Amino acid sequence: MVVSFIIVIFVVLLLTKTKKLIIMKNEPTKETINNFSDGTWSKNTFDNNGNLLSYETSDGYWSKNTFDNNGNLLSYENSNGIKENY
């Protein structure tokens, strides 16, 4: 437990130097949130196969993908009004 905590602190310090900090990775929902030094952020969610389901930024942009059981992209949609079905 202590070793894990030390590793997390090291990663946070390392990422802070690059002005990118992953503040949360929630394994059950496969979600990552990135906070940047300029106050902006981005959020990604993934399915159990690692496919990107959604992407969102602090400026209001978002995109969503759907996949079939084989991991093939079925649809894409974003906040600019683009909708694609495959």
Image (cartoon, helix red, strand yellow):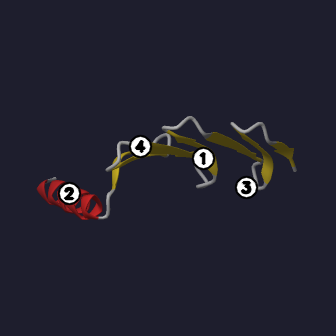
Q: State the residue position of label 3.
A: 71
Amino acid type, callout 4? Thr
Q: State the residue position of label 2.
A: 4
User: Of callouts 4 and 1, which one flags the residue occurring earlier in the amino acid sequence?
Assistant: 4
Separation (CA) of disc 4 from disc 2: 28 Å
- Does dot 3 land on a helix, a strand or a loop? loop
Q: Residue sitting at 71 percent across and 45 percent down?
A: 65
Residue extending furthest toward the front: 38
- Quadrant of res 63: top right
Is residue 11 or residue 1 the one in the foreground? 11
Separation (CA) of disc 1 from disc 2: 25 Å
Q: State the residue position of label 4.
A: 40
Q: Residue sitting at 35 percent across and 42 percent down?
A: 39
Left or right of 26 in this view: 46: right
Separation (CA) of disc 4 from disc 3: 31 Å
Separation (CA) of disc 1 from disc 3: 10 Å
User: Of callouts 3 and 2, which one flags the residue occurring earlier in the amino acid sequence?
Assistant: 2
16 is higher (above) or lower (below) than 67: below
Q: Are marks 3 and 2 in contact (CB under 8 Å)?
A: no
Amino acid type, callout 1? Asp
User: Of callouts 1 and 3, which one flags the residue occurring earlier in the amino acid sequence?
Assistant: 1
Amino acid type, callout 3? Gly
Separation (CA) of disc 3 from disc 2: 32 Å
Indicate the position of residue 24 as horizontal and vertical percent values. Answer: 36, 44
